[in-house]
Image (cartoon, rainbow, N blue to C red):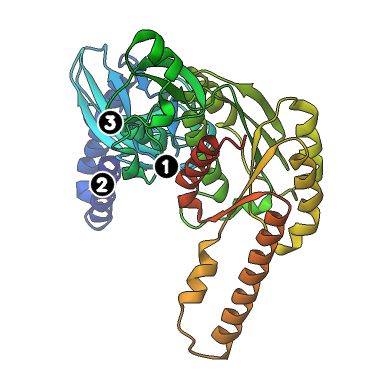
Amino acid sequence: MRPTLLSVYVLLVWFAIGIAVAIFPQWRIIWYGVAAAIALVALLDLWLLSYAAPLQVTRQVSGSLPVGVSSTVHVKIQNPGRSKLHVAVFDHYPAACEIDGLPQVATLDAGGWVQIDYRIRPLERGELHFGLSQILISSPLKFWRRNRLLGKPEAVRIYPNFAEMANYALFATDNRLSMMGIRKRRRRGEGLDFHQLREYRDGDALRQIDWKASSRLKRLISREYQDERDQQVVFLIDCGRRMLAKDGELSHFDHALNAMLLLSYVALRQGDSVGFLAFAGMDRYLPPIKGATSINTMLNSVYDLQASMHVPDYARAATELLKRLRKRSLVILVTNLRDEDAEELRPAVSLLRSQHLVVLASLQERILTDVLDERITDFHSAVRLAATDLFLEERRLAHEAMKHYGVMVLDVAPEQLPISLVNRYLDIKLSGRL
């Protein structure tokens, strides 16, 4: 229980009367009468509040939310009592979230209920926890407020933002893929694996015609092909300290996970199997799995992965992956390569290249390109520009060195990584290199 501002104001009035009584003692009986009236009303109000029926609070929130996306939380408050109540509501949301719409005030009719809605925007992945709902109940005469913690704690899973996958599903037709920047270079029926024989259609290439079948059936028959299936795509995800870098709200590590999930969705729909190995801090392995519904398994495996302050050990990660992979696979290493890492990375990629096709996806830091666009106004800015240009040149040379080892290199900004990886994967599928 706690007094309200009304109680404070009433006491101030009583004290003011007390000052007047000190000057005019004959008014003392009035002062005592006011004190008795205030005490009686306050005690009666306190008794009414104490015996009010307990409220019932339930929270409705999705068990899984995407990071960086606003969602609505519903808090339902029921009043089983026989008197109207005025309440102030604050829901104890997870600390790693932004909220809009709290606290709120509401009036509960006798036997009625009210629903409080507010918006929540998670800023971190993982398992986050809601606490109890805090309800401040005002007494009928507004002299007191009762502080109650009601409802129950809840845990929600915050997943990587899978909006990119939803967009891909929306645009995943031949005439719409270009709207996402994903290129389709061959039309259906001109893949690599034989699929079926069918009647010739206008536009079929001559090399598709099966002359033996055409001769036997006395009409033109074409071979239809499809992209190779049953191949493996395995991600080698760096969870080290450089992936903690941020160019906006999301870290490079979060962008890497979004790209991995988008490409996993595409590859699974192509009939390939997908897995990953996370290293440098949070070691985790998911063996290659296939099937369109396996994307849920991927989401549940990575939602709580976090980058750490560890230094990546590329050789150890490559050795560990080779122990687990028997079939030739497309291995995609996602990291932030710098020139000082080149010596350590070379033996690792050489080891991987002995059995697998390797793509190195290296994330750029936007601040570096921003420095190159700045105007030179003094000696300090000139030195910073020269140092940045030298750093980027050494980084470029490190990437060129990786290409000499037979590694395909993507050097892109984090926001461009999802589409760039999908395009490279489709190029590899069409070329038959895997």
Residue 117 tag number: 3
Horizontally, is 400 left or right of 33 in the view?
A: right
Residue 68 tag number: 1
- At numbered mark 2, what does the secondary structure look like: helix, strand or loop? helix
Residue 428 seen in the current view: yes
In front of the other: 104 or 59: 59
Q: Is residue 234 above or below residue 420?
A: above
Residue at the farthest bottom position:
378
Q: Nearer the viewer, mark 1 or mark 2?
A: 1
Q: Identify residue for label 2.
A: 9
How many neighbours does mark 2 have within 10 angstroms: few (below 14), some (14-19), or many (20 or more)? Answer: few
In front of the other: 19 or 9: 9
Marks 1/2: CA–CA distance: 45 Å
Q: Nearer the viewer, mark 2 or mark 3?
A: 3
Q: Residue at x 35, y 21 (%)?
A: 60
Marks 2/3: CA–CA distance: 33 Å
> Mark 3 belongs to which amino acid?
Asp
Q: Nearer the viewer, mark 1 or mark 3?
A: 1
Q: Quadrant of residue 133?
A: top left
- At numbered mark 1, what does the secondary structure look like: helix, strand or loop? loop
